[in-house]
């Protein structure tokens, strides 16, 4: 067993090989008292466990590692250390299903940048082939729930190859009798005239401009990244010199409230105060890609699962494409052709995630001499499973290797991030699930030619990796990258650029994190049968039912079935049995189950000035899936606690 000290001050436990794996980890468990796990299958095994730098203590005399109490330990915030292989999560780390896409028949069409060609190796499988044609896929002029249309009047026939002048196409091949032999879809990053004009207008600028690529992965906690993406993480840290934000915390429940602060620099509450609601499209708001576009950048936005996408789920999306290269028509068109899908992740014999990542790579390569801002968000492969993500480790690693090979690391800021950890299922209900959900993975890679006050900025970034950080900070960092040394007005209430020093006394309130999502709280368990637990349970039930009163025509009133967990954080440091409550401040975490429907709900209850209360409805977490239970309403957050009286109702 070897203990190695690597770059970025991270310790790694390495075992010599598969033959000694079990004995190696057995000795590790006995000697170091840190939870580890060995997952053995017929074809694979887990060979190493990665630990943190932070408060890890190393006794040089006997090489002993002791798990730290806190991974973030500042005056303002102490986030408990959670081992990625905590014993409570081990039962849920199962072997995932094989999602390898089948290739019994090779694809008839291949693409290279903006050229489409017939695959000569596939022609023997299509002996009756007569001709092929492709049809552009575009956004319809009037957006409803259909996000694409085929421009059949602009279909082009081809024999061997064709240059493509549109981003998305549907390819069809036929026999002489016009019988369909083959159908597939392709995505290209075709340079546009508008971006060429924008490029010419900024060519004479002397300022060093950095490209930006943001790669988001849905529902991926920091610890889940350790467990499931070891090759990707190794490439980020060892080959790209990434800085990992160990105190990066979410600020809202699901994807939307955690990505709005990144893309707009404000909270969803602030967005609502500015006139937005679920019936209002997003076109009139200045997102981060709009700011980069206004400064000469060519922009891209891509995501999968279009119907439940960031701006589409229970929302109105965009009337007009918000960026130069908008993946939405392609994603919607592929989802409208279910016969071309297999294993839920493969389309036309290709992994959907790879189709999107190839599109992003082509975008970077086509605009290699142009300022670019790309925002890609991947949801499908992780959205409903904590274990399936490990099957994508090679795909993400290959993408990063291509990123390096094509020299994009020279002048591109790369941010690999997530919105939150797993919000549902067994992992979330485990003892460490609450913390994992609130601590998403985030890595920042600076370009090799980075010169924005380089030494100070890099030093601050590395130090801030060990402090409480949020999506608001990512937005401010992007603004620093865009404007660099230019004077700019900082309007953010909560965000601090990661290139600036984050004060050590920063706490959740100052960072814009509500009590319910705060990870700096030090809770102690209480008896679920205690009087305080029962009282808090009734308080929470009353609060939830009050939320549902507006929808009483559709949603059932709920009853308390069971209290599963209650814990207390005495903020004042006073004993909970203190008789004088005038200055006592406490937070309580309450997890309960309701009926009908069996909803598992969790909230934070505050005790201030002698009164118990829940701050707002957004601070209620639903810990199990509610698909099919709340289809009668669309309003959020009531939707996550509603149990419909009838399957029929409003949609």
Image: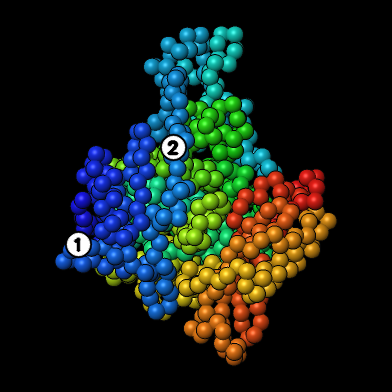
Residue 59 place in picture, x, y as percent: 21, 67
Q: What residue is shown at x 51% (from left), y 45% (from top)?
A: 385
Tell me which label, 1 or 2, sits earlier in the chain.
1
Residue ID for mark 1: 63
Horizontally, is 642 left or right of 196 in the view? right
Secondary structure type for disc 1: loop
Q: How many marks?
A: 2
Secondary structure type for disc 2: helix
* The quarter of the displayed image where residue 176 is located: top right
Residue 80 place in picture, x, y as percent: 41, 68
In the image shown, does 562 or 15 lie closer to the viewer?
Answer: 562
In the image shown, does 62 or 105 lie closer to the viewer?
Answer: 62
In the image shown, does 567 or 188 lie closer to the viewer?
Answer: 567
Question: Is residue 271 shown above or below 17?
Answer: below
Question: Is residue 498 shown above or below 330?
Answer: below
Q: How many other residues sit within 10 Å of disc 2, few (<14), some (14-19) or many (≥20)?
A: some
Q: How many other residues sit within 10 Å of disc 1, few (<14), some (14-19) or many (≥20)?
A: few
Question: Is residue 582 shown above or below 642?
Answer: below
Q: CA distance from mark 1 to mark 2?
A: 42 Å
In the image shown, does 301 or 141 lie closer to the viewer?
Answer: 301
Residue 473 place in picture, x, y as percent: 45, 67
Question: Is residue 154 shown above or below 204?
Answer: above
Q: What residue is shown at x 58% (from left), y 73% (from top)?
A: 588
Residue ID for mark 2: 354
Q: What residue is shown at x 50% (from left), y 11% (from top)?
A: 129
* The quarter of the displayed image where residue 5 is located: bottom left
Q: Is residue 419 visible?
A: no
Residue 451 place in picture, x, y as percent: 28, 63
Q: Is residue 388 visible?
A: yes
Q: What residue is shown at x 25% (from left), y 48% (from top)?
A: 24
């Amino acid at each position: 067993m070897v203990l190695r000290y690597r770059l970025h001050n991270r310790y790694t436990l390495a075992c010599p090989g598969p033959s000694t794996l079990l004995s190696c980890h057995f000795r590790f468990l006995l000697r170091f008292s840190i939870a580890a796990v060995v997952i053995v299958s017929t074809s694979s095994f887990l060979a190493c466990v990665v630990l943190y730098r932070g408060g890890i203590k190393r006794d040089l005399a006997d090489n002993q590692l002791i798990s730290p109490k806190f991974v973030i330990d500042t005056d303002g915030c102490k986030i408990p250390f959670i081992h990625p292989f905590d014993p409570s999560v081990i039962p849920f780390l199962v072997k995932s299903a094989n999602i390898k896409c089948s290739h019994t028949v090779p694809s008839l069409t291949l693409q290279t940048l903006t050229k489409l060609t017939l695959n000569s190796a596939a022609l023997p499988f299509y002996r009756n082939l007569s001709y092929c044609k492709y049809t552009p896929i575009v956004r319809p002029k009037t957006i409803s729930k259909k996000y694409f249309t085929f421009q059949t009047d602009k279909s082009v026939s081809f024999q061997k190859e064709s240059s493509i002048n549109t981003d998305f196409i549907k390819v069809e091949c036929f026999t002489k009798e016009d019988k369909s032999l083959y159908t597939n879809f392709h995505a290209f990053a075709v340079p546009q005239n508008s971006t060429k004009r924008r490029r010419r207008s900024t060519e004479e600028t002397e300022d060093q401009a950095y490209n930006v690529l943001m790669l988001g992965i849905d529902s991926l906690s920091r610890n889940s990244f350790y467990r499931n993406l070891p090759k990707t993480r190794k490439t980020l840290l060892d080959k790209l010199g990434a800085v990992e934000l160990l105190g990066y915390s979410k600020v809202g429940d699901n994807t939307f409230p955690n990505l709005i602060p990144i893309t707009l620099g404000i909270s969803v509450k602030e967005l609502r105060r500015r006139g937005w609601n679920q019936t209002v499209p997003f076109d009139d708001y200045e997102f981060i890609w709009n700011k980069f576009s206004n400064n000469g950048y060519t922009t891209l936005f891509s995501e999968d699962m279009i119907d439940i996408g960031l701006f589409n789920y229970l929302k109105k999306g965009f009337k007009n494409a918000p960026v130069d290269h908008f993946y939405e028509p392609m994603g919607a068109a592929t989802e409208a052709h279910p016969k071309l899908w297999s294993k839920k992740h493969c389309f036309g014999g290709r992994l959907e995630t790879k189709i999107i990542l190839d599109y992003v790579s082509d975008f970077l390569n086509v605009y290699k001499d142009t300022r670019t801002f790309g925002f890609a968000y991947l949801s499908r492969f992780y959205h409903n499973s904590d274990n399936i993500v490990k099957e994508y480790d090679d795909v993400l690693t290959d993408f990063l290797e291509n990123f390096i090979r094509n020299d994009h690391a020279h002048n591109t800021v790369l941010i690999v991030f997530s919105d939150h950890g797993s919000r549902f299922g067994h992992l979330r209900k485990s003892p460490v699930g609450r913390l994992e959900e609130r601590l998403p993975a985030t890595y920042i890679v600076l370009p090799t030619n980075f010169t924005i006050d380089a030494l100070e900025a890099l030093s601050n970034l590395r130090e801030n990796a060990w402090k409480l950080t949020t999506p608001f900070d990512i937005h401010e960092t992007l603004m620093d990258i865009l404007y660099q040394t230019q004077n700019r007005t900082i309007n953010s209430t909560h965000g601090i650029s990661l290139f600036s020093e984050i004060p050590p006394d920063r706490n959740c309130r100052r960072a814009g994190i509500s009590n319910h999502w705060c990870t700096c709280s030090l809770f102690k368990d209480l008896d679920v049968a205690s009087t305080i637990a029962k009282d808090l349970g009734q308080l929470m039930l009353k609060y939830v039912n009050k939320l549902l009163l507006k929808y009483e025509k559709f949603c059932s009133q709920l009853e308390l079935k069971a209290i599963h967990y209650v814990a207390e954080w005495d903020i004042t440091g006073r004993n909970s049995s203190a008789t004088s409550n005038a200055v006592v401040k406490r937070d309580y975490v309450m997890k309960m189950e309701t009926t009908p429907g069996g909803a598992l709900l969790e909230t934070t209850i505050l005790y201030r000035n002698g009164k118990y209360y829940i701050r707002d409805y957004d601070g209620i977490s639903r810990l199990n899936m509610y698909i099919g239970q709340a289809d009668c309403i669309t309003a959020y957050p009531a939707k996550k606690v509603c149990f419909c009286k009838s399957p029929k109702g409003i949609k």
